[in-house]
Amino acid sequence: MPSERPPLDFGPGLADNLAAMGKRKGVEEVPGSARDRPASAGPGTAVPPGVHAEITVLLRRRRPPPRVRGRRPAPLSIEELEARHGASPEDVAAVEHFARAHDLTVGAVDPGRRTVVLSGTVANLGRAFSTELRIHDTPAGRFRMRTGPLFVPAGLAGVVEGVFGLDDRPAATPKVRYPSARALTAYTPIQVGAAYGFPAGLDGQGECIALIELGGGFRAAELDAYFSSLKITPPPAVTAVGVDGGGNAPTGDPQGPDGEVVLDIEVAGALAPGASIAVYFAPNTDRGFIDAVLAAVHDKTRRPSVVSISWGSAESSWTEQALKAFDGALQDASLLGVTVCCAAGDGGSGDGAPDGLAHADFPASSTHALACGGTRLVIAQGRSTETVWNDGANGATGGGVSDAFGRPDWQKAAGVPASANPGHRVGRGLPDLAGNADPDTGYEILADGQRAPIGGTSAVAPLVAALIARCNQGLGRRVGFLNPVLYTQPAVHGAFRDITEGSNGAYNAGPGWDACTGWGSPHGDLLLKALGGSAPSRNLPRKRARAPRRGVRRR
């Protein structure tokens, strides 16, 4: 993360209290927990002390995972991950003792996810972590916020890696864009999949694709109508899973979060109709986002083999504890052999930040994410051409160099440039690959009764997730953490079409890997072959597994 931050504004009288707390023996700061108040927010008012809230406390691993270089270790089961790298019983017990001492209630405890859920009054939570919660009005709405760092007893220093849920300001935005006023070309997901050589005879059967959503919802009948229009029968099995009180809640506005949710389902479902699709709905907060990913990755019922994430925000908007916690959840996925596809952003190299600097979008910038950038795809007379997606004010692919994560070992030979920002930091480069994202050559979807084209790197994450599901089926095993082999095996990155024309602002496309489109757009057949598999010689009949009941299952 950038080392320079604006001065913190703790609110009336709180700065002195926190300074005194930091000097008191026996209390230590939770590393990276400091938060700033948005410039657009007023001084706010105190949250009534009797209001109840629920939080998630993240604990350290009992032992660190091995470092991944070029070769990937064999995937662990969820049970093995918990036993080797989950939270220890002693650490869980220490947090439970701390909670009781502060009149907090202990809720769900999950050593595998390394999480303990606590609840209580805002007053008790504030005292427990030495912070004050205030209500602030912002242009985006009214939210509960805190400023400054959090503190825990010295005995929990190093045990507690993060505390999430005290602050409920929005954590992310969907990476979706709508067409400009000029003439449009819209493709079905099937047409795009054909242009990318998705292996025939495979449909993702036996796989589960997890989609992470932070708002909005879908209507089952509308999904059925969409898939029927594409002659996909039976339609994919779709189920909603509620996390932290989130749920399938359509708004009726196709240009709101519903558009994101439906885009993800319809792209993934059209290209991997044999896979089951689990949609994890959570509140749009750092707690909700992290908990949703943990819920998907550690789901012992559905056991997804690939996760698609089309939400994110500039790295600079995250706390360091949230970056570390989220990256840890994605590291869990890599250990389990789960591929996590993340949209690389739609705001060009600046990622929509107002400071004029280059910013990478997170979670795509995590070294454990498969970052998905955007192109402009034109299909004509059976042939296709691609350039970097950059529509100026109407969006451009994200990409660049991370300020939060160093350059991983497997990326050192890719020619990742130094950051375009002052200081020219050396860091993780993104995206890793790309696909059609320009809304003016976008995907035709059906949302809230309206058929319309839609784009953004939001569409690329589920597109790639569907391709991974097909490859998993063809391989008879999980592709898993693709990044190390993508960068170190020429046959694998040779399965991508190099995009050499265009720019996302601070970075230009060129031969080989670049910070606009990574290795380029996929050729599915070649990728499957490079990974050691092959498509069946003929189309296989689809066997429909028992469809889960559509609706929300709360945890």
Image: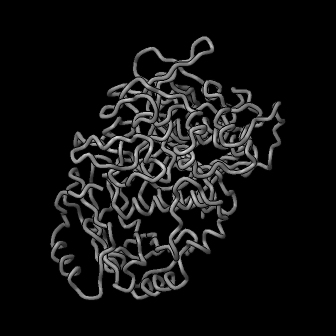
Residue 108 seen in render: no
Along the line of sight, the residue nearer the viewer: 424 or 397: 424
Quadrant, the C terminus: bottom right
Front residue (pair 231, 93)? 93
Residue 543, image x, y percentages: 83, 42
| Depth check, front residue: 291 or 298 | 298
Q: Position of residue 365 (x, y in %)?
A: 42, 49
Q: Picture coordinates of residue 95 (x, y %)?
A: 46, 82
* 252 to the left or right of 491: left
Query: Residue 491, can we see it?
Result: yes
If the image is split into quadrants, where does the N terminus sit? Answer: bottom left
Residue 25 lies, with reference to residue 460, above or below; the image says below
Which residue is depicted at the point 30% across and 34% down?
506
| Image position of 509 (left or right of 493) | left
Query: Quick check: 234 left or right of 73?
Result: right
- Can you say whether 180 is above or below 539 in the image? above
Residue at image coords 51%, 85%: 90
Report the coloring of the rendering: one colour
